[in-house]
Image (cartoon, rainbow, N blue to C red):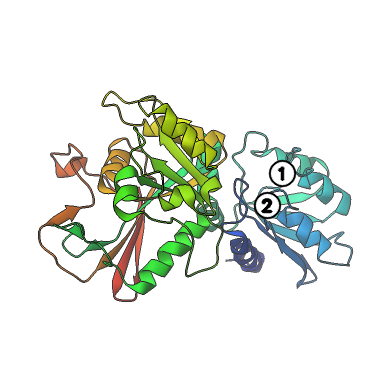
Amino acid sequence: MKKDTLDDSYYMGIAIRLARRGVGKTGPNPIVGSVIVADGKIIGQGYHKRCGDHHAEINAINSTKKNINGSTLYVTLEPCSHYGRTPPCVDALIQEKPARVVVGSLDPNPEVNGRGIKILRSKGIKVDVGICESECMQLNEHYFKFIKTGMPYITVKYAQTLDGRIATGSGDSQWISSEESRKYVHRLRGINMGIMVGVGTAVADNPQLTVRHVRGKDPFRIIVDSKLRIPIKSSVLTDANAHLTIMATTSSAPSGKMAAMKKQGVEVWVVKKERNGRVSLKDLLRKLGKREIISVLVEGGSEIITSMLKAGLVDKMIIPIAPKIVGKGLEAIGDLSINKISKSIKFSSFKTMKKGDDIIFEGTI
């Protein structure tokens, strides 16, 4: 491998680490990091901190008092070439005149998608693309799915025993997973823009669906409830974060209860019905996409997880598996109408990690 390629990978690795500081803070914008190098030394660095703020390249430029003319700028995602919440980054780069721009991955946004690179090259700036590409793309799996489909990236999470139960026969589920696993789950809440549960879970557990135990921004709380069975005094409807609650219901819900929830600051969305009268999950995801909620963590229960999988709406699954056996109990996933192993849901990639006593499986479908 050439020394230049090794150097490019090294500096892009630093840009990737910088980008990760923005995880959970930039949505619906992408996660991006940038490093500026001159004479073998880093003279500037930055990352996209939050939606509406300067992009990574601008923060990197602003971090150095030196002239970056003739330098190399590394950025994990193609510089934008359009006016959004901020001016185009390519304009700033053309003005600052780095000799070379190294891009981790293309931006599939139709308003960019190679255009930023083409503009830079037309102005005499050398551009290389695809350094640490897979790592850079993984940074923005939420953003890429949203840009390509208009729908949020869906991660399903549930804790289970070694024999595949999410609760005992009596319904007891606290706590299957270890404290370390639960902290990890709260971190997942902080990096997703929304958290979704079905009404069964909302009624049985009266959950808060907030980020605790770790630092992070509280997500939108999406409750799927076709007839608004949830008690009006539930935590998600009455606490300080009621304005972050979205009740996804149907025309079958009582109008009086809808009005009462709206009065409490809760958003009530009337979603299309399936033939069985339940909320159309696909229509709900489209509505979430229009609201620019680009990532959702689905935490249960069994009914909504099964429906999501059956409809082919799940992108990733994260399953803490506890070294416990309870025998007869509640399964995480119900009938998927799969009668052959060859038809089973498969994963394109997966990994495992240990948290406390638990093994956590994380796989991309």
Q: Which comes before the other along the chain, label 2 or label 1?
A: 1
Assign the N terminus to one quadrant of the image.
bottom right
Q: Is residue 327 visible?
A: yes
Question: Is 332 drawn above or below residue 293 in the view shown?
Answer: below
Q: Residue at x 52, y 37 (%)?
A: 262
The answer to which quarter of the image holds residue 33 is bottom right
User: Is residue 296 shown to the viewer in this render?
Assistant: no
Nearer the camera: disc 2 or disc 1 = 1
Q: Secondary structure at mark 2?
A: strand
- Whether pointer 2 and pointer 1 mark residues with C-beta atoms closer than 8 Å, the reply is no
> Which one is in front, 128 or 148?
148
Instruction: State how far apart marks 2 and 1 are (Cα).
Output: 16 Å
Residue 263 picture location, percent across and down = 53, 38
Residue 128 position in % (x across, y down): 68, 52
For the residue pair 90 and 25, the one nearer the viewer reads as 25
The amino acid at mark 1 is Cys
Name the side, left or right, on which 11 lies relative to 268.
right
Q: Which mark is residue 63?
A: none
Q: Which residue is mark 1?
A: 80
Where residue 85 sits in the image (x, y, percent)? 74, 42
**Residue type pointed to by label 2:** Asp
Q: Position of residue 79 (x, y in %)?
A: 71, 47
Q: Which residue is mark 2?
A: 128
Judged left or right of residue 114, residue 39 is right
Crowding near the residue tagged with mark 1, few <14, some 14–19, many ≥20 C-alpha atoms within 10 Å: many
